[in-house]
Image (tube, rainbow, N blue to C red):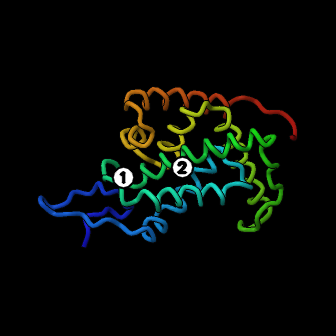
Amino acid sequence: MTALSPGLGLDAAAAPGAVAARPGFDEVYDQLFDFVWRSLRRLGVPRAGIDDAVQDVFVVVHRRLAEFEGRSSLRTWAFGIALRVARDHRRRARRKGGHAPLDARIPDEAPGPAESLARWEAVRELDRILGGLDEDKRAVFLLVEIEEMSAPEAALALGANVNTVYSRLRAARREVLAALSAPRGGFR
């Protein structure tokens, strides 16, 4: 039995003198794939490039897993990698003339068309609001509010001071609340 937490955090307390077994790449991939996909999408990677970005993250994870020192959880470490990959993909998209248009098709996963449309519009609105935040606030808001990390974990993932994370989080929350309460008229 390893000292790993269920989320591969490596932050579960181990018995004194016990050595935690390092998780294998397959285990890390299985545990973090959904988190990495959501993070990249919320960090502004266009839907058309999301698969490539996820692959880029896991190529780096595979290459660097042996160097992982356990000073943070694997989740925060992977988020740091995803943050850099998302930044690179957005830069590449800007150089190539912008983002690919969003797919207008609504997936048929919800019980009915009205529920599907409502969910799609909510996700689109969240993407719009997150896109209005600067990169630092967006990353903090994503980690704390959407991925439910603590502020100290977010600070580790971002390489920032905890107080800076709290400050960015407060500012991001104000901007998100203002965007949610702002009147939006008509159809787009």
Return the residue found at the far left: 16
Which SS class for mark 1? loop
* Circle number at residue 82: 2
Question: Viewed as shown, does residue 115 lie left or right of 152?
Answer: right
Residue 165 position within the rendered picture, expressed as x and y whole percent measured from the top left: 43, 32
Give the labeled residue for mark 1: 73
Gap in angstroms between the C-alphas marked 1 and 2: 14 Å
Residue 130 position within the rendered picture, expressed as x and y whole percent measured from the top left: 64, 38
Residue 80 position within the rendered picture, expressed as x and y whole percent measured from the top left: 47, 46
Foreground: 101 or 126? 101
Residue type at mark 1: give it. Answer: Ser
Q: Residue at x 39, y 55 (%)?
A: 74
Question: Viewed as shown, does residue 148 lie left or right of 102?
Answer: left
Indicate the quadrant containing the N terminus: top left, top right, bottom left or bottom right. bottom left
Indicate the quadrant containing the C terminus: top left, top right, bottom left or bottom right. top right
Answer yes or no: do the residues labelled 1 and 2 have beta carbons within 8 Å? no
Name the quadrant containing residue 38: bottom right
Q: Residue at x 42, y 27 (%)?
A: 164
